[in-house]
Image (cartoon, helix red, strand yellow):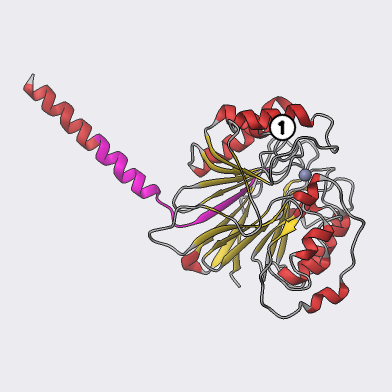
């Protein structure tokens, strides 16, 4: 009997030791960003080296929970079982619609958005969708204001990590002391956008020297205030093309001011991915590569990025491929992998 107890104790000890070591072996140094295909919606999963997870938007509601299932699959690939922080950039069904379905699949700990709303003319189903969102959040949502940060675990062995809100509820971050931005001489304004897109939460993620900008669906005039008359964003390494690559966002003045090294467009086969925005991004001299989640099937081949930079070529592909960016601060570079081709390319940090 005593032998058996000893054996069990030994098994427990070695079992837990093995788990401990395999857990250590899994410890990672990189920060990874998964651009999940939601067929023209938005869902961007960030996993820090401390295995903390931030999800910006959760794709569409409906389609039998398609987008929530795709997010869960990306989480499994990333090795996380819960979402620590979820940000609803704004209250359109292709961004916050998928949150209640995702909350049924995985635990979500903290919810952030641009503030409470009682009605929204943009969406006839707003009342029911917003109620489902609030129910998923148990009514505990935090409104982000420009300048607010999402509290992230500091890394014991790595550079500083910070996620700051740069736009929310039609306000933008200020306080820059730089000289006037010369790019603004070319600035034009567009008719005021009354939709919820203009209230989008925009987030800037800083990890050491790496900077990633995600503006949700922020439209032209308010996005322009981020860089005019003073560039309050500075240069960006990786830019998530705002508003799925529509030409009501992605102002060339913004692009020429933030000078991204690479851009990822979360377009669908027939949603976003405008020929104008693709052209504006590719013509920005700093841009080494534009990746698209989908080929714009209505545009000519030369109006899209080259196929090697497109994750999903067909209108109805068998599988939804992701685009994954990864930042290793020790290498002073970040990589982008096309989930379809599995080809990884490296880009130097600025
Ligand atoms: Zn959208």
Horizontal side of residue 187 vs 118, given as left or right = right
Q: Is residue 35 magenta?
A: yes
Horizontal side of residue 184 vs 149, given as left or right = right
State the residue at coordinates (86%, 70%).
187
- Residue 62 visible in the picture: no
Q: Position of residue 14 (x, y in %)?
A: 22, 37
Q: Which residue is mark 1?
A: 130
- Quadrant location, the N terminus: top left
The answer to whether residue 181 is above or below residue 220 is below
Q: Residues within 10 Å of mark 1 (few under 14, many from 20)?
A: many
Please, which residue is most extreme toward the left here?
2
Q: Quick check: which quadrant has ligand 1? A: top right
Q: Nearer the viewer, residue 339 or 47?
A: 47
Q: Is residue 68 magenta?
A: no
The answer to whether residue 249 is above or below residue 54 is below
Circle 1: element type: helix
- Residue 40 visible in the picture: yes
The answer to whether residue 132 is above or below residue 342 is above
- Quadrant location, the C terminus: bottom right
Horizontal side of residue 78 vs 317, given as left or right = left
State the residue at coordinates (79%, 79%).
182
Query: Magenta span covers which residues?
Result: 15-36
Q: Nearer the viewer, residue 216 or 14?
A: 216
């Amino acid at each position: 009997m005593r032998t058996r107890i000893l054996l069990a104790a030994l098994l427990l000890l070695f079992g837990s030791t093995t788990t401990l070591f395999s857990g250590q072996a899994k410890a990672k140094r990189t920060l990874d960003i998964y651009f999940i295909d939601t067929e023209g919606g938005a869902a961007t999963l960030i996993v820090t080296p401390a295995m903390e997870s931030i999800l910006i938007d959760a794709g569409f509601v409906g389609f039998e929970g398609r987008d929530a299932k795709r997010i869960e699959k990306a989480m499994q690939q990333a090795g996380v079982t819960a979402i620590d922080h979820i940000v609803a950039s704004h209250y359109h069904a292709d961004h916050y619609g998928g949150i209640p379905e995702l909350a049924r699949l995985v635990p979500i700990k903290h919810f952030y958005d641009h503030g409470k709303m009682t009605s929204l003319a943009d969406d006839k189903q707003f009342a029911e969708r917003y109620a489902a969102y609030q129910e998923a959040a148990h009514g505990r949502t935090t409104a982000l204001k420009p300048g607010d940060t999402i509290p992230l675990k500091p890394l014991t062995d790595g550079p500083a990590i910070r996620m700051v809100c740069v736009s929310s509820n039609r306000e933008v971050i200020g306080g820059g002391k730089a000289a006037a931005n010369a790019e603004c001489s070319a600035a034009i304004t567009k008719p005021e956008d009354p939709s919820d897109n203009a209230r989008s939460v925009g987030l800037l993620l800083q990890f050491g020297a790496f900077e990633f900008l995600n503006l949700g669906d922020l439209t032209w005039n308010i996005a322009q205030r981020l860089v005019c008359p003073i560039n309050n964003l500075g240069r960006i390494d990786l830019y998530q093309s705002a508003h799925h690559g529509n030409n009501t966002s992605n102002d060339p003045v913004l692009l020429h001011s933030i000078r991204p090294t690479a851009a990822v467009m979360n377009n669908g086969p027939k949603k976003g991915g405008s020929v104008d925005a693709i052209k504006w991004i590719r013509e920005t001299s700093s841009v080494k590569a534009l990746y698209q989640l989908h080929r714009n099937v209505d545009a000519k081949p030369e109006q899209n990025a080259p196929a090697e930079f497109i994750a999903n070529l067909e209108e109805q592909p068998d599988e939804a491929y992701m685009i994954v960016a990864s930042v290793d601060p020790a290498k002073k570079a970040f990589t982008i992998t096309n989930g379809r081709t599995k080809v990884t390319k490296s880009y130097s940090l600025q």
